[in-house]
Image: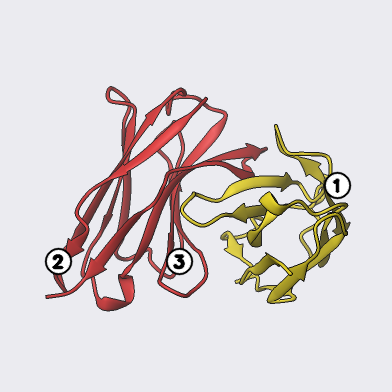
Chain colours: A yellow, B red
Amino acid sequence: DIVMTQSPLSLPVTPGEPASISCRSSQSLLQSDGYNYLSWYLHKPGQPPHLLIYLGSNRASGVPDRFSGSGSGTEFTLKISRVEAEDVGVYFCMQALQTPTFGGGTKVEIK
Amino acid sequence: QVHLQESGPGLVKPSETLSLTCIVSGDSISSNRHFWGWIRQPPGKGLEWIGNIFYSGSTYYNPSLRSRVTISADTSKNQFSLKVTSMTAADTAVYFCARAAMLRGIITGVDSWGQGTLVTVSS
């Protein structure tokens, strides 16, 4: 299995400030087609997870442009340019190059 | 707007079979643009991919669960189902049904999720 490792586990943030979450995979997620099969999600309490970023850096429909994804191969980053109160929840990454596996999650909360 | 809703028992006895159904609205499971799958999350633990089905009926199962899992689809009702045999306490989890977008047969992202249903295994 491809192991996905996220950091940090917990991220206290100040509204209006930037935030960054790291996701590392045990194998490269860069496919021969040039795409990284890595996606990011936000799971808010009481709601199902929702897709933020797919193929490493593409924002899903309706996702605010303060969210961005970057990276390639085994190192990926999700950035929030200016955190808003509604961004709290657990963020996780997922690879789908092999049997899909998920990162352990990063809990984002307001300071 | 696609909507997925899980249905099934919240309590299953050890050694019994879990049966869950995902009712889909707003999209057709007969479409060749998506996989339809099941994901679970045990309390306090991470997410685990269970498996998925394609419109053709082809299925993929997580090797860790393959011997106990069956996913099937009923296109006439626009729903798909999950069966897990020989349930144990380790199978206690929130079970999500989901729709996954794909590119050349590889999942690019899970773009719709059901609310999730908690299944507890206990006698």
Same chain for labels 3 and 2? Say yes or no.
yes
- Which residue is located at x 45 percent, y 66 percent? B63
Observer-side mark, 3 or 2, equals: 2
Which type of secondary structure does the marked residue at label 1 adopt? loop
What crowding class fits label 3: few (fewer than 14 Cα within 10 Å), some (14-19), or many (20 or more)? few
| Quadrant in which the N terminus of chain A appears | bottom right
Task: Give me the chain letter of mark 2.
Answer: B
Task: Give me the chain letter of mark 3.
Answer: B
Q: Is residue A23 visible?
A: no
Q: Which residue is mark 2?
A: B16
Q: Would residue A98 appear left or right of A82 to someone viewing this image?
A: left
Q: Which residue is mark 3?
A: B63
Q: Would residue B78 appear left or right of A55 to someone viewing this image?
A: left
- Image x and y of residue B65, in percent: 38, 66
Q: CA distance from mark 1 to mark 2?
A: 45 Å
The answer to whether marks 3 and 2 mark residues whose Cβ atoms lie closer than 8 Å is no
Q: CA distance from mark 1 to mark 3?
A: 27 Å
Q: Would residue B51 appear left or right of A111 to someone viewing this image?
A: left
Same chain for labels 1 and 2? Say yes or no.
no
Q: Which residue is mark 1?
A: A34
| Quadrant in which the C terminus of chain A appears | bottom right
- Which residue is located at x 52 percent, y 25 percent? B1
What amino acid type is highlighted by mark number 3? Pro
Task: Give me the chain letter of mark 1.
Answer: A
